[in-house]
Image (cartoon, rainbow, N blue to C red):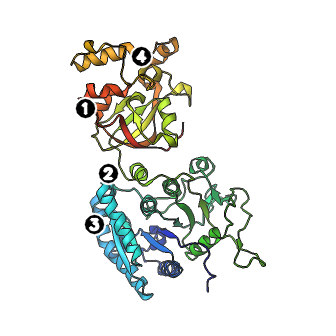
Amino acid sequence: MARPRHGASCTVVIKLGTSSIVHEKTHQPLLSTLSAVVETVVHLRAQGHRVVLVSSGAIGVGLQRMDMESRPKSLSGKQALAAIGQGRLIALWDNLFGQLGQPIAQVLLTRGDISDRTRYLNAVNTLQELLSMGVVPIVNENDTVSVSEIKFGDNDTLSAITSSMIHSDYLFLLTDVDGLYTSNPRKDPKAKAIQVVSSVQQIRSQVSTSTLGTSLGTGGMETKLIAAEIATAAGVTTVITSSRSPQSVFNIIEYNNSFHSGSSMSGGSGRSSPVHTSNHQDLIPLPRPPHTIFLPSATPLRDLKAWTSHTLAPSGSVIIDHGAHVVLAKRESGGRLLSAGVIGIQGVFASGQAVRICVRRWKGCGAQEETIARVETVPETQPTTPTIVPTASITSSVSSLETMAMSTILPAVTESDVVLMEKPDEDWVIEEVGRGLANYNSAQIDKVKGLNSSYMPQLLGYADSEYVVENVTIRVPP
């Protein structure tokens, strides 16, 4: 019997990949693994935890049913196999969970289903209602209707977004290795396990992600790092561990919940062990199950920002200057971008659509930002009502207003600015640093870029907001 649970009840998302569900060669279901997962989920439910299972495998099961050796290359072929396999896959799960009296529900999603805010909230409410009823939702991407534009790309990403949607405490990515390593442990005997990760961005340079994955799966370790980045940003503790021993999920939760409040987990030797605190006179160290844990962000994204950053496909890009990048990276900015910080637009997008937030960098400067932003941008420290240009001289002509505004309140051009302005386009690179929701369409933002927001009513004919983009989430710091 398992030891008594310690700590509060948790919401847990468990992702199981195709290689953990069907055999890579024969495509037969791995019943021993699936049964162990079912027993683990039922055990977690008995301990008071709420569990969501993200299951791949529809195409793999379809291959077995049609006696095909490999995945078809055409989109329609993959979708047909997914349609064949999905029914058999959910029937398999229902049969196994039914043996232990646990009800389940099938939830099929595409990115298009949650790109609309109303449909996103409906999906969240459905998942929460199922969990409150004691049901285990089994989530999968709806491959039958997905196309490249609305696919999550991999169920690792889907599991991270699902974790964010329901504000889960844990996301478990079950795979064919028991954690993150500096190189492929199947080929390199010197590969070292990484036990604790506090920054996915920093750990990328220390690990190899190019060699893992199977012919049936669509991911590998890189997609798990992407998933960990999404989930931890939303405040979800993310774990990579082996699918060969699913029962370790319970042990990992117990192990991490047994830390004293205020104690820290470091990425050093990993030898510090939590203790069983039920008997203060007899402290018993708990063994650490093999796994890599990604620590959640101390300042997680609120729901709307998480939705904007990870569930919406951006329709275009808004290029900002260095100063705006610095301001937006601060939590107190509220994620709102003024027109003065915009130096350019890429693509065509409508008001309300998601956009990339990008910074333009000069290749010759490395990380140094372009100082040309000082020429192209009107500081918001200017008076809210410009007084330099007489009101009588502002005509109804938009071009006339733009000309006078730019000619009267721009700072003086320095010699270094001129040098940068003369650099050809190929010397510049555009780097995405975040995402946001546009308050105005691309043509309107292009018209007011670099200008004080007080000009917006005259230039656009209206101004619903002084901010051109809101709910901005900066993922790459300045």
- The answer to whether mark 2 and mark 3 are in CB contact below 8 A is no
Residue denoted by label 2: 149
Earlier in the chain: of badge 2 and badge 4, it is 2
- Is residue 454 rendered to the left or right of residue 364? left
Image point (54%, 59%), residue name: 212
Q: Residue at x 28, y 15 (%)?
A: 391
Examine the image and state in which quarter residue 402 appears.
Answer: top left
- Which residue is under mark 3? 80
Amino acid at dot 4: Leu
Q: Can residue 136 be seen from the camera position used here?
A: no
Camera-near label (3 vs 1) is 1
Q: Residue 406 location, x and y as percent?
A: 36, 17
User: Three-letter amino acid code at disc 3?
Assistant: Ala
Circle 3: is it few (<14), some (14-19), or many (20+) Cα within 10 Å? some
- Which circle marks residue 8 in the picture? none
Q: Quadrant of the C terminus?
A: top right
Element class at badge 1: loop
Between the C-alphas of marks 2 and 4, the distance is: 41 Å
- Mark 2 and mark 3: span between their CA atoms? 18 Å
- What residue does disc 1 label? 462
Mark pair 4, 1: CA separation: 24 Å
Residue with the mark numbered 4: 410
Which mark sits nearer the N-terminus, 1 or 2? Answer: 2
Measure the C-alpha gap from mark 1 to mark 2. 33 Å
Q: Percent from the top left, x then y, of residue 258?
A: 66, 70
Horizontally, is 237 left or right of 164 in the view? right
Few, some or many residues within 10 Å of mark 1 (<14, 14–19, 20+)? few
